[in-house]
Amino acid sequence: MRVMEIKNPFNAPVYHEKYVDSTMITARNLALKNEPHGTVICADFQSAGRGRQGRNWHIESKGNLMFTILLRYRKTEALPKALTLRTGLAVSLALEEFSPELQGLVKVKWPNDIIIRDKKITGILAETDGNNVFIGIGVNITQREFPEELREKASSLINFIPLPGENPHYKLLEFVLSELFHEFEEDSGKNSWHEKLTKKLYKMGETVVFSIGAAGSEKLIKGTLKGINKNGELCIVPEGRETIEEFPAGELKVY
Ligand code: BTN
């Protein structure tokens, strides 16, 4: 069903389904049907929600925000760089606009999580088929209970701020779309994301443990988080060393 009341600055349709397997799959089908750049599909429930590195994304109920936006590029070379990080920046700014009480509290955990007070609130999954980009975003808004294995790590906006009465997920979606439009259309050539993101980087300047490379990698290093470089790689000075090492893939182990 097309939702007319949601403002989409990309000037493209916003669809809403009650049940889908994953909005990532629906978005790929919409791309095959020639839906335009900026088309959005959101859902109340996903039976096969996907997370990064082959994990599942399971959030419970209606009231959370789960959507994928389709961005179309004519050539692979035109695909935006540092897509996941820049999406994280856009979502973190949108959360602060949605609720000014969150100002200064929203952090981006490299490469794809949004953290408030050490708890994961949002996950981001960016995929591409060469020309099309599919950016999937899940924000925990109203969920109070989490499965045991997530209880220590995850939380919801409702635990931090009073939510606006009606359809908070639609309201937040508008802010996110506006920030995505700003980042990938209006500001696309300016490269201002790097400085803005560095200020919001989770654990910046702190000691971290980092697992290098693919999911489940046993190769861990401990060191001081120094930031990100212009390619979006994570910069760490390992313990006992003085020079920065740059990591294109891996996972921060602490939060
Ligand atoms: C992660 O933290 O591993 C990324 C989670 C991404 C979840 C969103 S929810 C909407 C979209 N559809 C999916 O199946 N996944 C993304």
Image (spheres, rainbow, N blue to C red):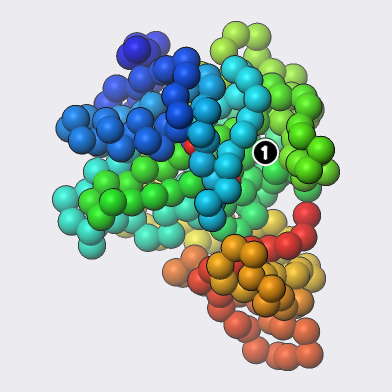
Q: Is residue 90 shown above or below 222?
A: above
Between residue 109 and residue 200, name the one nearer to us. 109
Residue nearest the observer in this picture, 94 or 147: 147
Classify residue 186 as left or right of residue 222. left
Q: How far from the left and from the top, in percent, is residue 214?
A: 56, 67
For the N terminus, the image quarter is: top left
Q: Is residue 2 left or right of residue 139?
A: left
- Residue 5 lies, with reference to residue 122, above or below; the image says above
Query: Which residue is label 1 attached to?
Result: 121
Q: Residue at x 20, y 35 (%)?
A: 32
Q: Is residue 51 left or right of residue 183?
A: right
Image position, residue 230 (x, y; %): 46, 69
**In the rendered image, is residue 86 in sight?**
no
Find residue 10 and report its image quarter: top left
Most extreme residue toward the top, as rendered?
166
Q: Residues within 10 Å of mark 1 (few under 14, many from 20)?
A: many
